[in-house]
Amino acid sequence: MAHVIFFEKSGCAGNGRQKALLQDSGHHVLARDLRYMAWSNHAPLEFLGGLPVAQWFHPSAPAIKSGEIVPADLDEPTALALLRDNPLLIRRPLLQVGDERRVGFDATAIHDWIG
């Protein structure tokens, strides 16, 4: 099975369930708290590239829910700076297997990707 690097918010119940599903499927999961990563301006693009800017953001982040930040109104450089400065805004989980990186947890897509 796969060795999955799982970037999460430690303590998040949803991320906990997602990790458990991966582990129950036989995958080795190495969890990393995305809050403590040294994100560069472009590192999130390795996971988010190809998605519209609005889909880069975690919809339940307080600044998103309150309307303080409106992802659909942001250009790419501004969005990347916000994600770098506040990683809890990043849509999660971020997943890496080998050199391939993905964002979000769609169980069917993950099964098709790594089994």
Image (cartoon, grey):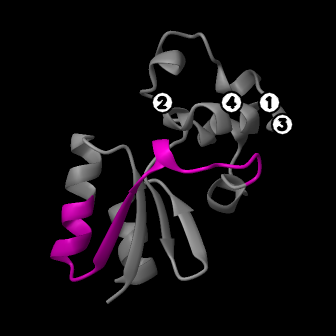
Q: Mark 4 packing: few (<14 Cα in 10 Å), some, or many (20+)?
A: some
Element carrying mark 4: helix
Query: Which numbered disc, 2 or 1, marks the residue that appears first in the sequence?
Result: 2
Residue type of the residue flagged with mark 4: Leu
Mark seen at residue 78: 1
**Disc 1 to disc 3: CB gap under 8 Å:** yes
Residue that numbered label 2 is attached to: 59
Front position among marks 2 and 4: 4
Q: Mark 2 packing: few (<14 Cα in 10 Å), some, or many (20+)?
A: some
Query: Which numbered disc, 3 or 4, marks the residue that appears first in the sequence?
Result: 3
Separation of marks 2 and 4 at Cα, in angstroms:
14 Å
Looking at the image, which is closer to me, 92 or 54? 92
Residue that numbered label 4 is attached to: 82
Residue that numbered label 3 is attached to: 77
Residue type of the residue flagged with mark 1: Thr
- Where is residue 32? Give x, y as percent: 40, 58
- Residue plotted at (33% across, 64% down): 107
- Residue plotted at (68% across, 62% down): 46
Looking at the image, which is closer to me, 57 or 6? 6
Front position among marks 2 and 3: 3
* Magenta-drawn segment: 19-42
Residue type of the residue flagged with mark 3: Pro
* Quadrant in which residue 22 is drawn: bottom left
